[in-house]
Image (cartoon, grey):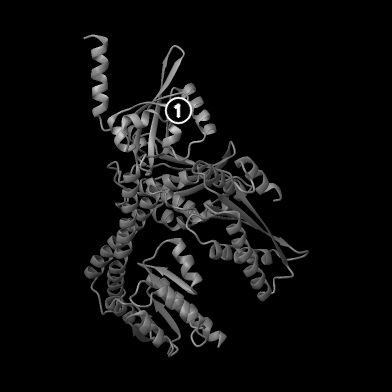
Amino acid sequence: MDAAMNAKLAAFAVDRIDEPVLWMDSAARLLYANAAARRSLASSADELLSRTLFDISPDLTPDMWRGLWKQISAQGHFECEFSLRALDGRIFAVDMSVHLFQSGADERACVFFRDIEEHKRLQQLKEEFVSTVSHELRTPMTIIREGVSQVIEGLRGDVTPDQHRALSIALTGIDRLGRIINELLDVSKIDAGKMTLRRERIDFTSLVREVCGTFALRARERHLEIRTHLPEKPVESFVDRDRIIQVLTNLLGNAFKFTETGYVQVSLAVVNGDVQCTVEDTGMGIPREDLAKVFNKFEQLGRVSVTGEKGTGLGLSICQGIIELHHGRIWAESAQGKGARFLFTLPQETARDVFRRDLTDRLTEAAADGASLSAVWFKIQPIDGAPPAAVESAIELLENLVHKHSGRKTDMITRDTQTIFLGMPATVSKEAARVAEKVRGSFADCVTREGLDHQVRLSSRVTSFPEGAPSQEDFLRQHFAEL
Amino acid sequence: MSKILIIDDDPNGREMLRFRLQKAGYEVVEAADGDDGLLKALRRPDLVLMDVRMPKLDGWQLCKSLKTEPRTKHIPIIMLTGCSQPIQEVYGRECGADGYLTKPWDSAQLMQMIRSFLSSTKDAA
């Protein structure tokens, strides 16, 4: 076959595949679009070929394109989430993968993209479904649990030992069902990216002690030892306390489940600025080839627990979701018969670090969408000699007021010991100032009523992008300058 | 004898609660929806147990109304609900709930909570 024929065959095939394909040059001019791309962008070939990527992207700026092209040239290939605008005006999110084609000095990019709107919609539906179902299941479950409990407790008359045993087993099953429902809800929230963290400043050493304490009884019953290996000084970080307890409880629970003799040990250390926590046991261990699979949903690897308890197969997947939401990492180390070690690391952050990072992400999105964003911090300052308790109740009060007056789902609220950070996507400065004023007004009323007005003072600052601060760097500098 | 008002649209749920409470020596009054609950709350029970998702007036609204009405605002309210998200509990507290338990709750915990609310209102009175 000659070269011309080969080219024709290739073009024929590319035109008939379902995945949209585009060719572009370094100036973002569109050189080619296959049939799938033309359908997706609602245009004819002629219409498209006189345009650039700027014409079919609602977000792209020349700066962004220069950065993008630099990356394409340097790496030869990259993938990102991007939005496109069809010629009929429909804006849609895509997964995009870009490949560099080089021939001498000639550089072009081959682009594949996939419309993910449908996928997003399905995710949303799935999450709503799970949340409704789990809510609806709770009511009948409560009635069953209460009925069984009343009979077991003898409230409904005498119970024979056999009946008692049967009902105890039923109760175990009901409680397991309850856990499955909770875990399904967690998994679906994590999958949909909707699990939000309620971070606060905590000391990890006391948290580990507390969680280990809840296992003391179990350890005695099973003749296992719980060891802790903790630094002497507090290890502080800004995390969701309940969620981290959930992770530790899960890891310890697993360790107990799969260990017959010996000990379960929890160690804590600060490694390269990260908090590193290790839960290890002297149990049956996990074969090396299964290590990568332990975090998969519903994966139970055929391990049978020492006590015969059954898990849900969701616990470790949730742990992973929670740790990753905290920008940390979780993994397992083990060899068959040699015990298992589960390790996770979390960045050691302050409230300000966390808020700054969240804000930076939102700013990037706002810049890409050409949207505005405002941020407010509220700070409580004690007036000479005010007791710490006064500051504590003031910040508690302030947090409630910020929740009450901001109150949109997309708002980000981060609480520190004396400061509340509020980030409001898609909000202009006037609106943000109005919220701040309302909070200040209610706060003044409340502190007067509670007699705190001579003990604390409230200061605040509103910063808005792009009105007050035209670039992201300006915004962050201005916003945190006086804190 | 302390009087407890149960507000829940599900008769089976009410029956289970009523039985346990009566066995523990409480007097029980029942209401099958939010409106009925509001009326019966005006007859001053010592404590209210309420579901959240109910026809007519839902638990959030009902709780707010009871906590703003001078005749009922001192009555402790425990919400018993399938709404298990932390943010929903925050909302429940904002509406004025004194206690918040998610389904399926631990009966021992519920009874303990009832005892402690009743003894603290008695101390106040």
In the image, residue B90 above or below residue A374: below
Q: Secondary structure at mark 1?
A: loop
On the image, the x and y values in percent for residue A282 come to: 41, 41
- Outermost top residue: A2
Mark 1 residue crowding within 10 angstroms, few (<14) / some (14–19) / many (20+): some
Numbered circles on residues, count: 1
B113 relative position to A305: left or right: right
On the image, the x and y values in percent for residue A132 come to: 32, 61
Which residue occupies 48% across, 73% down? B95
On the image, the x and y values in percent for residue A44 come to: 31, 33
A434 relative position to A185: left or right: right
- Outermost right residue: A384
| Residue type for callout 1 | Ala
The residue where tag 1 is placed is A28
Residue A300 picture quarter: top left
On the image, the x and y values in percent for residue A458 come to: 69, 62
Specify the quadrant that holds the N terminus of chain A.
Answer: top left
Asked whether A279 or A201 is in front, the reply is: A201
Which residue occupies 23% across, 66% down? A166
A448 relative position to A256: left or right: right
